[in-house]
Amino acid sequence: MTLTHLKSLIHKIILVLFLIFIMTACSNNSTPKPIESLTPELNNGTPTSLATAVETNVTKSLYEKGISLLKSGDLKNALQIFDQLVKEDPNNTLAYTQRGITKSQLGDTEGAIADFNKAIELEPKNYFALNARGSLYGDMDNLQGALDDFNSAISANPNYAKAYANRANIYAQMGKYDEAMADYNKAIELEPSNPTYFFNRGSAYGDMGKFDKAIEDYSKYIEMVPDDPGGYFNRATAYAEMQEFDKALFDINKAVELDPQNPQLYLLRGMIYGQKRLNDNAIADFRKVLELSQDEDLRAQATDLLQQLGVSVTPVAP
């Protein structure tokens, strides 16, 4: 076999592995999607019966303090605040809901579900609690339970954008893309300033093979959140699917610039370099994957690609 034929074979092998990686990257296994789920909120547009939950100045001040602590990541002190609110007023549905969100972020799934259940028991049309419980069910892969809760939340408040966005995520996971698109579109109509809706709709378009539409949504997301490497990574995968490798390389370079310790970015960039036959650059990036990654699958892919490029690699345990 001549050197030219060998290089051609290596390129074909890289192309196959590249396409496998891209298909994976465009699915739910890429960089984490920004999911609109368990997010703390103030009493904004909640049902009338919930307004009494924060009606006194003292209670409202304490509630807002708990929200502030939750948003800042001070989960332990936030939990103490919501514990105090629940103790002082066992019918405070918002306090139960926010305590459930806090418990969920602390890893207490059972306690979070119990609090969401209590909030919904006290106020069956508490769409905030229904959305929060549905989000947690989704995280638990209880897709039907999540779908039921998002349906109930939307029934209670047909203008609650987050419930449409979350239901769209569930539909997308179920492969029901027509329903997912209708819900993403509704969420964007109701709350056009929320970048996560564009990101997740872009991901769904990618799963559907509509990469031009995915690029439009990722571009909108990047416009709104220019410092998130995930937007550039996902747009790079979509460009790569369309074999627009120069644009893909531009985006993955930006992602690496923003997150230089992420080995997955180097793996994708190395594959793009391989498609452009910039083998030295590809080799450097695959070596970088081995330097940074502790993930066995990622290391195995990088090792295999290096070997296809004629680089002898001694397997080293991460």
Image (cartoon, rainbow, N blue to C red):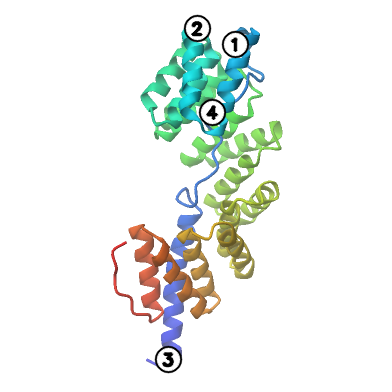
Is disc 3 surrounded by few (<14), some (14 to 19) or many (20+) residues within 10 Å? Answer: few
- Using the image as rendered, state which of residue 299 and residue 27 is in the foreground: 299
Is disc 1 surrounded by few (<14), some (14 to 19) or many (20+) residues within 10 Å? Answer: some
Is disc 2 surrounded by few (<14), some (14 to 19) or many (20+) residues within 10 Å? Answer: few
Task: Please report whichever mark, 2 or 3, sits nearer to the chain's N-terminal start.
Answer: 3
Above or below for 186 versus 282: above
Identify the residue position indicated by label 2 in the image: 88
- Using the image as rendered, state which of residue 60 and residue 282 is in the foreground: 60
Depth check, mark 3 against mark 1: the one in front is: 1
Residue at image coords 54%, 57%: 259
Three-letter amino acid code of the residue under disc 1: Thr
Task: Please report whichever mark, 3 or 1, sits nearer to the chain's N-terminal start.
Answer: 3
Three-letter amino acid code of the residue under disc 3: Leu
What number is the disc on residue 59? 1
Identify the residue position indicated by label 3 in the image: 3
Q: Position of residue 91 (x, y in %)?
A: 50, 7
What number is the disc on residue 96? none
Mark 3: secondary structure: helix
Residues at circles 1 and 2 in contact by the CB criterion of under 8 Å: yes
Q: CA distance from mark 3 to mark 4?
A: 61 Å
Residues at circles 4 and 2 in contact by the CB criterion of under 8 Å: no
Q: Position of residue 252 (x, y in %)?
A: 58, 63
Identify the residue position indicated by label 4 in the image: 70
| Residue furthest bottom in the image | 2
Q: CA distance from mark 1 to mark 2?
A: 9 Å
Query: Left or right of 224: which side holds 294?
Result: left
Residue at image coords 53%, 45%: 33
Three-letter amino acid code of the residue under disc 2: Glu
Residue at image coords 60%, 25%: 41
Q: Position of residue 195 (x, y in %)?
A: 65, 42
